[in-house]
Image: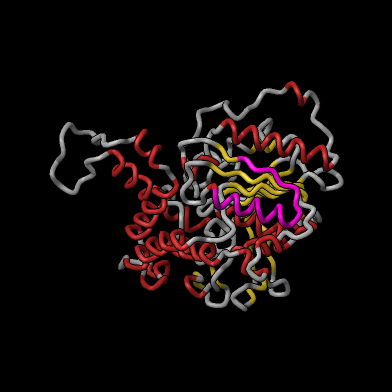
Amino acid sequence: MAETTKAASQREADEPHSLVVRFGPDQPLAMDAGVSLAPLTIAYQTYGTLNEDKSNAILVCHALTGDQHVASDHPITGKPGWWWIMVGPGRPIDTNRYFVISSNVVGGCMGTTGPASLNPATGRAWGLDLPIVTIRDMVKAQAMLIDHLGIKTLFCVAGGSMGGMQVLQWAASFPGRVFAAMPIATAAKHSSQNIAFHEVGRQSIMADPNWLAGRYLDQGTFPNKGLAVARMAAHITYLSDEALQSKFGRKLQGRSAPTFSFDADFQVENYLRHQGASFVDRFDANSYLYVTRACDYFDLAADYGGSLAMAFKGTKTRFCVVSFQSDWLYTTADSRAIVHALNAGGASVSFVDIETDRGHDAFLLNEPEFIATTRGFLDAAARARGLPPLAGETDKQPAEAAKPASEQTDN
């Protein structure tokens, strides 16, 4: 009998279809919660070739429910990697030129140690016994991976949404190890509204009777309904009102008149139900609790006496901050606050605020201005870094539009 999608998802937690590095008890991850996590497994993917002096490595940090499969087919869904538009041969993050690394975050569910992973001390899934994870913990674990790969300095760290938080944390925690940084559609702290949306999602999971206080895997069950509702609520924040109105409006789903029931009469209702139902097949409910909590705790300035500028004081890293005008989850004002802090800290920074009606998820889609911005920033940084140009680089045609823009969202 073919493996079910749910079984495949659970298997990925400990036997991922990707590279892994395992750190033993002698190499613990010191966590912000005041405890050490060991052993620790990090699942990751690489694309391209690391050059001789290891100066062309780009770390791509994934968003909330993303993973290490940035440019390769997802082993559960079979869909293209979540950033195939940006990463690959001839694309803005060109794997003919750069060595791209992407790892699943600590607390995730695709092979890096998370609540669905086996706890060797108990012989069962970690569940809520896993210590609470922060963005800084995620970055510390990534630094352990980069050390394992023998890379002293990353050419660039890039990512959107929660990935952008990781970029900012990298630049603050390891300024000497980051030549260039691209924080995209992100913020230096989670707002009260952001926390509120995440709490709604967490409570929907914990209210599901199949959650069983986080020990559902021990009982062979899963809080599908609660996780689906959490995904539906979050997905609304990834889109703009303009995008929802343009795509759905008040159109009915497969009918000419309302049913006067609580069925999915409207197309937008059907769309959200589909998003929720498909999400539960690839993501662990407890992981959702952990990664949303990590975002909630993120407040970079708080670690520097309340001054965000102090987080970047004297940094030599060059930055490109990108926002999208219709993004109401992490707004243009949030990005401007990052830019002002970088300027106050004396950093080299460029800022692009892109006009689009696609909302927060625009960084995952085929947005020409964003694609051009990324290519231009990396090309300029590569020249400053002394990376050799590709043969015929000025004549190459962009490959990012070779297939239709994906509507897949992995926030």
Pick the front one: 319 or 56? 319
Look at the picture and state if 260 lies above or below 191: above
Asked if the magenta segment contains residue 115, the reply would be no
Is residue 45 visible to the viewer in this orientation of the structure?
A: no
The part of the chain drawn in magenta is 333-352
Look at the picture and state if 403 lies above or below 109: above
Residue at (46, 48) in percent of width and height: 328
Pick the front one: 325 or 154? 325
Total label count?
0
Q: Is residue 382 left or right of residue 78?
A: right
Residue 105 on image: x %, y %: 59, 59
What is the quadrant of residue 87 in the picture?
top right
How is the model colour-coded? secondary structure
Pick the front one: 165 or 355? 355
What is the quadrant of residue 81 in the picture?
top right
Q: Is residue 19 left or right of residue 5?
A: right
Q: Main secondary structure of the magenta part?
A: helix
Residue at (40, 37) in percent of width and height: 243
Residue at (47, 58) in percent of width and height: 10
Judged from this view, the residue extending furthest toward the top is: 395
Residue 149 on image: x %, y %: 76, 55
